[in-house]
Image (spheres, rainbow, N blue to C red):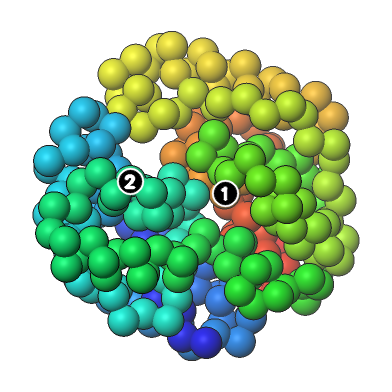
Amino acid sequence: MTADLFIPCLVDRFLPEVGLATADCLRAAGCVVRYDPGQTCCGQVFVNAGRPRDATPLARAFVRRFADSEAVVGPSWSCVEMVREGYREVLDDPGLAREWEALRPRVYEVVDFLTRACGARNWPGRLRARAVLHWSCHMPRDEAVRRAAEDLLAGVPGLTLLPRPPDECCGFGGVFMASWREVSASIGRRRIETLTRENPDLVVLGEPGCLLQLRSVAPPGLRVLHAAEVLAASIRGEP
């Protein structure tokens, strides 16, 4: 299968290692990986800021760029959700709307793609660590999706998953973080306290915004990693 990388703005600007790890995971699953450097923001930030009309040209560009893709795969549930669901409200061209409807089922978050489209059940390599999972607010509530992601990570040789605490927002919230930084940081500190009660080596998650937020409040010695980084580190043999 050929997988086109869908790189969110936060990954492009602040977390390139997450994009590289995503590509490594896709190759490990047997995919041919392509990256189009001409891709732009998916438009989520404008919708979140109450400016959906500004997202329309970005949605048009995304659909035109990826309309013929076999699979479009990105390391962000919120951006994937924007493309899968949010474009319904911002696309104003009936022809493009039909192309989008055809494209929607082929847009995936990376771990969801590995488990659902590639059928990955066991992951190669080894990574010795104790990890706790933080699932973002945008991750689907579908228990099958969550269980598949947890099972894949739990199948990494040497990686021990600690009990996952109840879901709670990390406080990032995109525009919310920028407008209400102190409140956002306070929520983040509360969340990191909950996640670190059993002294994990790693906090593992699937959302770039949550990653930046929790890294900013994490205590010394605690690594906060994207799930794709964990899977890629395993196959690279990194400590």
For residue 222, which numbered disc appears in the image? none
Q: Does 92 sit above or below residue 112?
A: above
The image shows residue 63 at horizontal and vertical percentages of 25, 66
The image shows residue 140 at horizontal and vertical percentages of 58, 44
Amino acid at circle 2: Gly
Query: What residue would you read off at disc 2?
Result: 86
Is 3 placed left or right of 110 in the picture? Answer: left
Q: Quadrant of residue 118?
A: bottom right
In front: 25, or 20?
25
Circle 2 — which element?
A: helix
Residue 39 seen in render: no
What separation in Å lies between label 1 and label 2 (alpha carbons)? 19 Å
**Residue at the image position 56 percent from the left and 38 percent from the top:** 136
Amino acid at circle 1: Gly
Is 2 placed left or right of 230 in the picture? Answer: left
Q: Quadrant of residue 6?
A: bottom left
Query: What residue would you read off at disc 1?
Result: 206
**Residue at the image position 44 percent from the left and 28 percent from the top:** 172
Near mark 2 (Cα within 10 A), the count class, few <14, some 14-19 or many ≥20, is many
Q: Does 146 sit above or below residue 46?
A: below
**Residue at the image position 81 percent from the left and 64 percent from the top:** 156
Q: Earlier in the sequence, mark 1 or mark 2?
A: 2
Number of numbered discs visible in the structure rendering: 2
Residue 239 seen in render: yes
Q: Does 143 sit above or below residue 60?
A: above
Q: Are marks 1 and 2 in contact (CB under 8 Å)?
A: no
Q: Quadrant of the C terminus?
A: bottom right
Circle 1 — which element?
A: loop
Q: Does 127 sit above or below residue 175?
A: below
